[in-house]
Image (spheres, grey):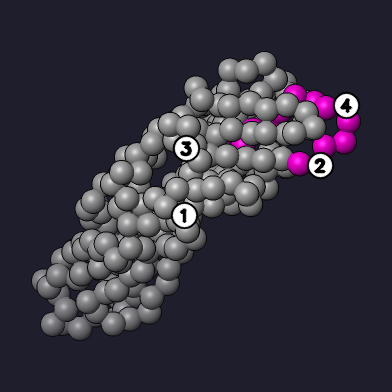
Amino acid sequence: MMDLKLWLSILMVCGMAESLGSGKDWLIDVPSRISVLQNSCVVIPCSYVYPKARKMLKTWRGYWKRRGTVVASNFPNARLTDEFYHRSRIRGTIQSGNCTWQLNRVRETDTGPFYFKIEIPQHKSFTFSQNTVTLNVFRVPEPPTMSVAVQDEVTATCKVTHVCPSSPPKFSWSHSGTRKTRSKKENKWLWSTTSTLTFTPQEADFNMPLNCTVLFKGNKSTKGSVLLIK
């Protein structure tokens, strides 16, 4: 395992040490609060460090819990309630210290707080109950951020943020042209996706709105508009 002091130093330099476990030699890094769109998905980043062992370890069992109930696990025999069955999975490799968790089809009741527990049968176990993650679930997505530049060509951009990198939003425009889409990681859990539209304007295009519609995973949509001015 990585030296604990070195690991903490890296976290502080990178601005990641926002939520650390309080147990001796047990450390975890998780966001305390994430806003997520209802019906979409959320990827909750998580990394942890456990005390060094003097023997070979073979088994790591990770559990995400809410009020003592298991909502995700890498252990095949772990029983999930019907509420989370088929919606929840641990994406990270537990033995390497990655406890990242993904929750799909987010419901209004999926607020948490959630916390992580690690079991190493040949070693030790620890519950990070003081380092919880709360989800702020909202129903209506914010309108996209839009910009437009008019020269010989029109270049318009339409940008939204989201927490579901495995299923980025889809864009449609009210005008034809060349379209490009790119996604960027803004921080550990937040992503932005931008659609850029380029076209040669006609006289009839000016003083008319240019609309961008964004469709998120879960069939939630939002719309933005800009006016083309010479």
Counting from the top left corner in percent of width and height, residue 113 is at: 40, 33
Residue at image x 50%, y 40%?
Answer: 70
The numbered mark at residue 85 is 1
Residue at image x 78%, y 28%?
Answer: 123
Q: Which residue is mark 4?
A: 54
Look at the picture and state if 20 lies above or below 58.
above
Mark 3 secondary-structure assignment: strand
Counting from the top left corner in percent of width and height, residue 60 is at: 71, 40
Circle 2: residue type: Lys
Q: Which residues are magenta?
A: 46-59
Mark 4 or mark 3, which is nearer to you? 3
Mark 4 secondary-structure assignment: loop
Q: Which residue is mark 3?
A: 69
The numbered mark at residue 58 is 2
Q: Callout 3: 10 Å neighbours few (<14), some, many (20+)?
A: few
Q: Earlier in the sequence, mark 4 or mark 3?
A: 4
Mark 2 secondary-structure assignment: loop
Circle 1: residue type: Tyr
The answer to the question of whether label 4 and label 2 lie on touching residues, with beta carbons closer than 8 A, is no
Q: Is residue 43 left or right of residue 148?
A: right
How many callouts does the rendering have?
Answer: 4
The quarter holding residue 141 reads bottom left
Circle 4: residue type: Arg
Q: Earlier in the sequence, mark 2 or mark 3?
A: 2
Q: Earlier in the sequence, mark 1 or mark 3?
A: 3
Q: Is residue 151 left or right of residue 191?
A: left
